[in-house]
Amino acid sequence: MSATRKRYVARLVGRCLIFIACVCLWVFRPQAFDVLEGNNFFRRLSPLHLLWVIWAADMFLQIVPIKNKVPLGSQKLFANRFRPIREKINYEALRNYITATTRSAYKVFILWCLLIAAIGLLHRFGVIDRTALFMISVLFYVCDLICVLIWCPFRLIMKNRCCTTCRIFNWDHLMMFSPLIFMGGFYAVSLVVMAIAAWLVWELCVMMYPERFWDHANAALKCSECTDKLCTQYCHKLRDDAPANHISREVCHYEKTRSNASGRLPALRRPDDRRPGRHLGAGRIQRLDDGQRRLHRREHHARGT
């Protein structure tokens, strides 16, 4: 597990603990949520002030360039994380890529707006109160890292390879704090404004510097250059190394035996099988041929990425 992924796992655990702590406050000390109303943010102290500081710091780290401390997926908008490819950039392909990913991004945006509108209606008709809106945002705070470390439903629409190339990586705070739109008060409004600012910086950079967001223009986004290893559940390189090496050993043994064959094809012995009398028949030979073809396809795909 990479250092970046370890940090994110620790952050997920921390966010789960924060959610549990907020639930406990909701049940045993509901007056702590009074700071959510109006300007009470400046009138009394609450554990929620600490959470506000954490959230504000998270958003600040998304709009300033910080190397090696924040994942590349979040910092790829900045020039210091851009490594141009050696070949000439295909700007027509770049334009098509940005157009396609932006279209998918705003499909996600529309679906999220529908969800938030439903939450707003529940609040409007008194089904959920101000504190429940806040707790929904804290729940989204936990789900944000679940999407990074375990499974992200938005990939079904975005079709991105991983978090590093994700078009909407820095939309997290905008989506997280969108339920607070219906709350009012300094606490909620300040977080929403900062989230919109971080989102606008991201979107402006997509329009002004699209080459930084495409792995065929920014070499730093390629799988072979990845140092974060943040979302290894999607990393085909790590998942396929072991099978590929096993197949390659058998294919090399098979080709060597075929090259030495004179007349009929000799029986093939499994490379990792030292027991006498264990040979590979015609079916196994066919599977080795299939394995060789898979290796060629993987090598071609690796050169393409």
Image (cartoon, rainbow, N blue to C red):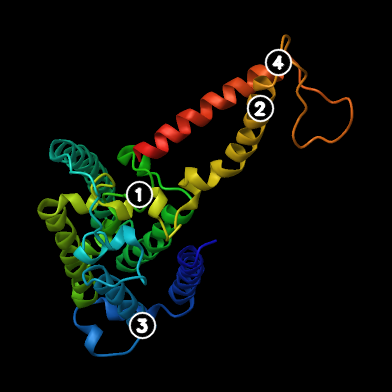
Q: Amino acid at mark 1?
A: Lys
Q: Which circle marks residue 256 in the picture? A: 2
The label shown at residue 283 is 4
Between circles 3 and 4, the one closer to the viewer is 4
Indicate which disc, 3 or 2, sits on the residue closer to the N terminus: 3
Front-most of residues 106 and 249: 249
Can residue 175 be seen here? no
Identify the amino acid type marked 2.
Answer: Lys
Mark 3 crowdedness (10 Å alpha carbons): few <14, some 14-19, many ≥20: few
- The label shown at residue 191 is none
Q: Quadrant of the C terminus?
A: top left
Left or right: residue 219 versus residue 184 is: right
Q: Quadrant of the N terminus?
A: bottom right
The three-letter amino acid code for the residue at tag 4 is: Gly
Q: Nearer the viewer, mark 1 or mark 2?
A: 2
Residue 222: mark in rendering = 1
* Residue ID at (45%, 53%): 231
Q: Residues within 10 Å of mark 2 (few under 14, many from 20)?
A: few
Element type where label 3 sits in the image: helix
- Say which amino acid is labelled 3: Leu
Q: Which label sits on residue 50? A: 3
Q: CA distance from mark 3 to mark 4?
A: 65 Å
Residue 274 x/y as whole percent: 84, 36
Mark 3 and mark 2: Cα distance apart in space: 66 Å
* 183 lies above or below 109: below
The kind of secondary structure element at disc 4 is: helix
